[in-house]
Image: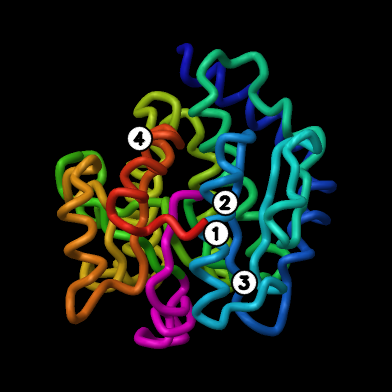
Amino acid sequence: DASYGMARSLLLEYFKQNEPISKAMAQLKQKTMVVACLIDDESDVLLVQNSIKSFVRLGGSKEQFFVIRRKDSISCKQLDAKCITVGKAANLGSSISDPFISRNFLQAWLAFAAADAGANVLWQSPGTIWMKHPSELLSQYPKSLDTMFLFKGREDPRSAPFHVSVDLFYASSSDRSIHLLHEVMLHADLMIEWRSMDATTSYRLSENNARYGTSTFIFPPQHALHTTLLDHSSATAIFEAATSPEPPHVIVFPRSELDSDEIIKVMKAAKLWLL
């Protein structure tokens, strides 16, 4: 069917370009965890700049923050962070009219390649605000965990039972984590059919947990808050969460559901805009 045909096209591009992508992702391998963010175009730059500022003000090192851009034309000068260009992958899925699908597949590919290269990476959306240092978030859970994911809510039955979001997720370089991420990428037909990387990841996580013992933890909203659980446009509710006596470690605005101008507008109203 159409989904299978598009998935086959994406996977053929993966097999052709896997080596340079793997070399690029090997740069993320460090002794400590790194934070990485994929950006598609110039509209993401301001969001990432704001996110980096929230990270650095908490003592985060810019050496730990990697911005992965799809093309050299996206300027990283103002970001003052390590930038990696994924080269020919900028044209990934050029035959597919839906950029959402090609971006999701690329995100899955990069996560797999980074873990396969031995990197332990905390992947985030451009619209992410750190309220506490990421290490404080991860230190609350066993180091033996293969993966950790953001909780998005139970509205989508396809995501049962885990209901995860890839707007924020941690992937270790363990064999089981690598296998999970590889399976997510290989299920590109589901990603296309469902138009959701979240649902595809939840499905594979359920399978891998049952069959291979892949360990995971779902961040509770009081630790990592996905704004889907609130009204995206409710600056008041988001401000109240951010200024509560026990604020979450991180607040994540889904770039896949809101455009950058909408996110910036709400962030400013919620006093989360730091630029």
> What residue sits right under mark 3 in the picture?
34
Query: Which class describes the residues within 10 Å of circle 4: few (<14), some (14-19), or many (20+)?
Result: few
Mark 4 or mark 2: name the one nearer the start of the chain: 2
- Quick one: SS at disc 4? loop
Say which mark, if any, is on residue 179: 1
Task: Check disc 2 and give the amino acid type.
Answer: His
Magenta residues (range): 126-146
Judging from the image, what secondary structure is the residue with disc 1 in?
helix
Frontmost of labels 4 and 1 is 4
C-alpha distance separating marks 4 and 3: 25 Å
Asked if residue 91 lies left or right of residue 190, the reply is: right
Tag on residue 182?
2
| Label 4 with label 2: CB-CB less than 8 Å | no
| Residue 257: numbered disc | 4
Q: Are marks 4 and 3 in contact (CB under 8 Å)?
A: no
Image coordinates for residue 177, horizontal then vertical, percent = 52, 65
Q: Earlier in the sequence, mark 1 or mark 3?
A: 3
Q: Amino acid at mark 4?
A: Glu
Identify the residue shown where x is 15% and y is 41%.
Answer: 155
Dot placed on the residue nearer the N-terminal end, 3 or 2: 3
Whether residue 213 sits left or right of residue 228 in the image: it is right
Q: Is residue 78 left or right of residue 228?
A: right
| Disc 4 from disc 1: Cα separation | 28 Å
Q: Is residue 206 above or below residue 96?
A: below
Q: Nearer the viewer, mark 1 or mark 3?
A: 3
Instruction: Give the CA separation, mark 3 to mark 2.
Output: 20 Å
Residue displayed at 45% across by 37% down: 260
